[in-house]
Amino acid sequence: MKPLATLLLLLATIPALASKVPDSAWQDGTLREMTTDSHTRLFGASNDGHGVIGTAAYVVTHYIIDGPNGYSYEVNRLIRGRQKQLLVTVHGPIKFALVGHDFYIRDDEGKTQKLIFVERVLRTTQP
């Protein structure tokens, strides 16, 4: 695929991402925790006795979000290449939506970001 066609396809999918989330799905929560792990991946290819080996670095950011309904949500985001961390505030308010198995947040700039849903945990209260 040509670079221009790829760019146009990517730009066309951005509004579709935001339109997947109905207004009624958005909830108010608190970003309780945010941690990161750095990883590297080894990859390679060989052909006719000649090969190439390389590594790729990526970061996984883990988020814990407390919702108003007694649940906490663990979600992740993979950061590759030149991608940057999301602009969010730990211990601050955050808008989120769980639509099926898709989890979305609105960052501090109001942009919708899709994250990887890991689990939902019922919070227990301490006596």
Image (cartoon, rainbow, N blue to C red):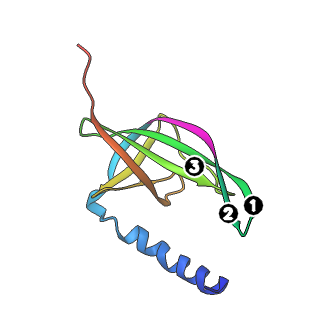
Residue in the picture at 66% in, 82% down: 3
**Horizontal arrangement in the rendering, residue 5 relative to residue 19 (left or right):** right
Residue labelled with disc 1 = 52
Q: Are marks 1 and 2 in contact (CB under 8 Å)?
A: yes
Residue type of the residue flagged with mark 1: Val
Q: Secondary structure at mark 3?
A: loop
Earlier residue among tags 1 and 2: 2
Residue labelled with disc 2 = 45
Name, please, the residue furthest toward the front. 49
Q: Are marks 1 and 3 in contact (CB under 8 Å)?
A: no
Asked if residue 34 is among those painted magenta in the image, a careful observer would answer: yes
Q: Nearer the viewer, residue 50 or 66?
A: 50
Residue type of the residue flagged with mark 2: Ala
Residue in the picture at 57% in, 50% down: 86
Please provide the residue range marked out in magenta: 32-40
Residue labelled with disc 3 = 87
